[in-house]
Image: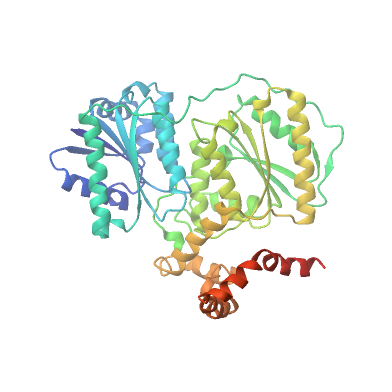
């Protein structure tokens, strides 16, 4: 079998992910694993149509496709995302149709499931036959049992190709609605009380719905509102994956483009942040993905804590389960308050006007009161992965995170709670006595609410 491996790492062959592919090559030498460095070569593939066509010809000639990538902010790298966009823009989708495919990632398991869900949705849209995902920890290759599972994963892909096995799709085709938004001027403007607003977008001149939503929201406020278009921000390139920022948050692009000064001034300096984007395939545009990737110069440290956050979306937002989860995760990890999202799916301009006016009022009010909704599992669980990794194996490399986590009190390990440890040391043996346990159980419900009732009194 000839398997084409689409490499999603900007580091090319020096990526950790490719070492897992090399292991598959060694374990299944009777098959060809042809690696194409997509993310690293994206600029040439986009600029040179012939180079892009050669990659598509390799896909067309292959028996199967392996999407192999490291995680970049809950998804694939921005360059990989751009390649996926080019598949449709250049009419190359037919080269993927009917081919068996699988996805392989390496990460520390921070929302790797959303990256695989995105790739699977793309494969369904391309009418491919998806075999499965292998979400590896970056160090799993050193574990004999995990190496064995990786080999089995490769065998499953090959077996599916050999058997011409069918595969069920789980993502329905995206249904887009044609609708022209005609905003009306607001009856009154909501006072911002001195709070600063940044609306960040990538809107092109022909994206009139999104531009209309931006203008309608801006007109809903009386105060300082700045609209920044990512197309006008000086971004020299995507994240290099070099980790130079890990020591002191200094990006490799420092002094070479304007991304860091833009982020520091326009986002960190705002009280209310609104992202205005158009749905492109199953995410936002690759330019937005590059924005999130480049924001990693702050590494794993939240930098927008306490800010109000909202989304303006043009496109089928309600059909984007994975994207909605990623945006909620982003807000909760940053410890912002996600006030809501307004989309142009409603197909009623008056309803959109009312929703935008309400969103403006909610953002202004919550900015004044300092309201931030409690985090769910997405924010709590995700941050604990970072907490444990930075305390442990990543501490020496990610010095900036370690110092920030100490300062922010992120190292809230349960074994440091001496009150709970003492309680467990006394209570656990007592509950081993049957009569004590029966008495405890009989009073369980009342005992659980007693501290709360005392507080309420």
Q: Quadrant of residue 119?
A: top left
Residue 285 in view (yes/no):
yes
Image spot of residue 96 (x, y percent): 33, 26
Q: What is the total number of numbered labels drawn onto the structure image?
A: 0
Q: For this view, does 332 lie left or right of residue 365?
A: left
State whether residue 90 is above or below residue 327. Answer: above
In the image as oriented, which residue stretches furthest toward the right?
Answer: 188
> In terms of depth relative to the viewer, which is nearer, 225 or 141?
141
In the image as oriented, which residue stretches furthest toward the front?
Answer: 435
Q: Residue at x 78, y 47 (%)?
A: 364
Q: Which image quarter holds the C terminus?
A: bottom right
Image spot of residue 449 (x, y percent): 71, 65
Colouring style: rainbow
Q: For this view, does 257 lie left or right of residue 204?
A: left
State whether residue 386 is above or below residue 127. Answer: below
Residue 237 in view (yes/no):
no
Q: Quadrant of residue 83?
A: top left
Q: For this view, does 248 lie left or right of residue 332?
A: left
Q: Which image quarter holds the N terminus?
A: top left
Image spot of residue 81 (x, y percent): 43, 37
Q: Which residue is drawn at 17% across and 47% down?
A: 27
Image spot of residue 150 (x, y percent): 26, 48
State whether residue 300 is above or below residue 131. Answer: below
Q: Which residue is drawn at 75% across and 34% down?
A: 355
């Amino acid at each position: 079998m000839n398997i084409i491996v689409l490499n999603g790492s900007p580091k090319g062959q020096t990526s950790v992910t490719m070492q897992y592919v090399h292991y598959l090559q060694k374990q299944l030498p009777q098959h060809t694993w042809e690696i194409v460095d997509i993310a690293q070569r994206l600029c040439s593939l986009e600029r040179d149509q012939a180079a892009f066509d050669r990659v598509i010809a390799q896909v067309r000639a292959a028996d199967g496709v392996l999407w192999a990538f490291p995680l970049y902010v809950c998804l694939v790298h921005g360059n990989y995302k751009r390649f996926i966009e080019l598949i449709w823009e250049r009419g190359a989708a037919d080269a993927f149709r009917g081919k068996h495919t699988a996805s392989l990632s390496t990460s520390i398991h921070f929302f790797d499931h959303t990256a695989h869900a995105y790739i699977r949705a793309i494969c369904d849209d391309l009418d491919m036959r998806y075999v499965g995902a292998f979400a590896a920890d970056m160090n799993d290759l050193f574990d004999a049992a995990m190496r064995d599972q990786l080999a089995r994963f490769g065998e499953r892909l090959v077996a599916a190709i050999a058997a011409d096995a069918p595969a069920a799709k789980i993502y329905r085709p995206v249904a887009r609605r044609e609708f022209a938004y005609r905003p009306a001027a607001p009856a009154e403007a909501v006072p911002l009380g001195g709070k600063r607003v940044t609306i960040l977008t990538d809107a092109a001149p022909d994206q009139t719905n999104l531009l209309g939503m931006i203008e309608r929201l801006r007109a809903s406020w009386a105060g300082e509102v700045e609209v920044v278009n990512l197309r006008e921000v000086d971004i020299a390139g995507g994240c290099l994956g070099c980790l130079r920022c890990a020591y002191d948050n200094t990006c490799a692009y420092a002094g070479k483009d304007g991304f860091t000064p833009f982020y520091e001034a326009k986002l960190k300096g705002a009280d209310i942040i609104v992202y205005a984007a158009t749905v492109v395939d199953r995410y936002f545009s690759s330019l937005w993905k590059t924005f999130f990737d480049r924001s990693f110069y702050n590494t794993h440290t939240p930098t927008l804590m306490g800010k109000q956050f909202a989304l303006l979306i043009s496109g089928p937002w309600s059909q984007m389960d994975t994207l909605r989860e990623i945006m909620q995760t982003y807000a909760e990890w940053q410890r912002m308050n996600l006030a809501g999202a307004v989309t142009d799916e409603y197909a009623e301009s008056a309803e959109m006007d009312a929703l935008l006016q309400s969103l403006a009022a909610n953002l202004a009010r919550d900015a004044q009161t300092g309201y931030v909704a409690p985090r769910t599992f997405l924010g709590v669980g995700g941050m604990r992965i970072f907490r444990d990794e930075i305390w442990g194996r990543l501490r020496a490399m990610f010095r900036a995170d370690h110092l920030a986590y100490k300062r922010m009190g992120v190292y809230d390990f349960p074994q440091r709670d001496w009150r709970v440890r003492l309680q467990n040391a006394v209570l656990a043996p007592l509950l081993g006595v049957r009569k004590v346990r029966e008495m405890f159980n009989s009073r369980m419900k009342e005992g659980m609410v007693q501290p709360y009732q005392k507080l309420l009194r």
